[in-house]
Amino acid sequence: MKVGILGFGTLGRALADGLRRHPDVSAIATTTRSGGESNAEVARGHEVLIVCVKPHHVEGVVREIAPELRSDHVLISVAASVDVAHLREWSENKCAVVRVMPNTPVRVFEGMSVIAKGTEYNDRATKIAQSLFSTLGKVAFLDESLFDAATAISGCGPAYVFLIIEAIRDAGVRLGLPRDIALLLGSQTVLGAAKMALQADDHPAALKDEVTTPAGCTIDALLVLEDGKLRSTIMRAAIAAAERSRSLSS
């Protein structure tokens, strides 16, 4: 299949790099505001089109390519806060539309992509989206009404984790570790813990208890984190992000 990526920012580049690994993708074209092929030209020659621009630019891009759309096209939007109903309207209902929300770790092929599901969606288009984004990491299906919640968890989530890694690195520096070693220790620890959480049958709390020996140093650290309300702060941060996403989409 031939894939056109309309918008070549950070996410667009990551998608292009990842999709080159897909065995069924024979060609990838991209568009930028600085020149090259136009959105309409790419739409004319590629059957799968991924709209990868800022949310406030989506309507203009989709209306621009609408005259070129055919029934065999699959239009995939990765823009936050733009629902399927609007995408169908702007594309004049000429082709199948799929809404996908990936996150930035698609750059390292460990992304989390959420695909809108529902009886009204085109099965062929959904399977194509699933196949493409599975190349970039893991895929989950959610009702579109839950996309604001997913945005708050997986879409915004990498920023929460980067902040925690930065804090762990700075703690290591304070304790005398070289900055690069502190970053390695913190980053690999987060990676390993996340892999354990995905693969283990146990609740994360049980995994935490495995590390927390009686009268050990971990319980002292956990007490400080609980005093600092880390758990409730992260929960409230995600809720705030979801509410912001909901306000943008309404």
Image (spheres, rainbow, N blue to C red):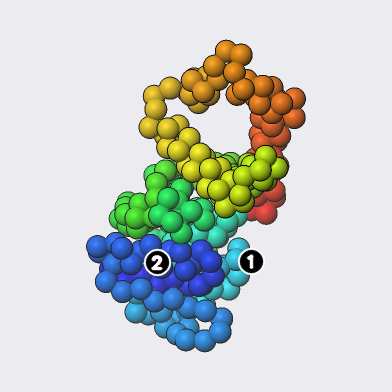
Point 56% across, 42% down: residue:
186
Q: Is mark 2 on a helix, strand or loop?
A: helix
Residue pictured at 58% horizontal, 56% vertical: 80
| Disc 1, SS | helix
Of labels 1 and 2, the one closer to you: 2
Residue nearest the observer in this picture, 62 or 92: 62
The residue indicated by pointer 1 is 56
Whether residue 110 appears in this view of the structure is yes
The location of residue 245, given as percent across then percent down, is 65, 49
- Crowding near pointer 1: few (<14 within 10 Å), some, many (20+)? few
Q: Residue at x 66, y 43 (%)?
A: 176
Residue 227, labelled with which disc? none
Residue furthest toward the left? 23
Residue reaching furthest front?
A: 176
Expressed as whole percent of the image width and height from the top left, the position of residue 151 reads: 57, 47
Question: Which label is found at residue 17?
Answer: 2
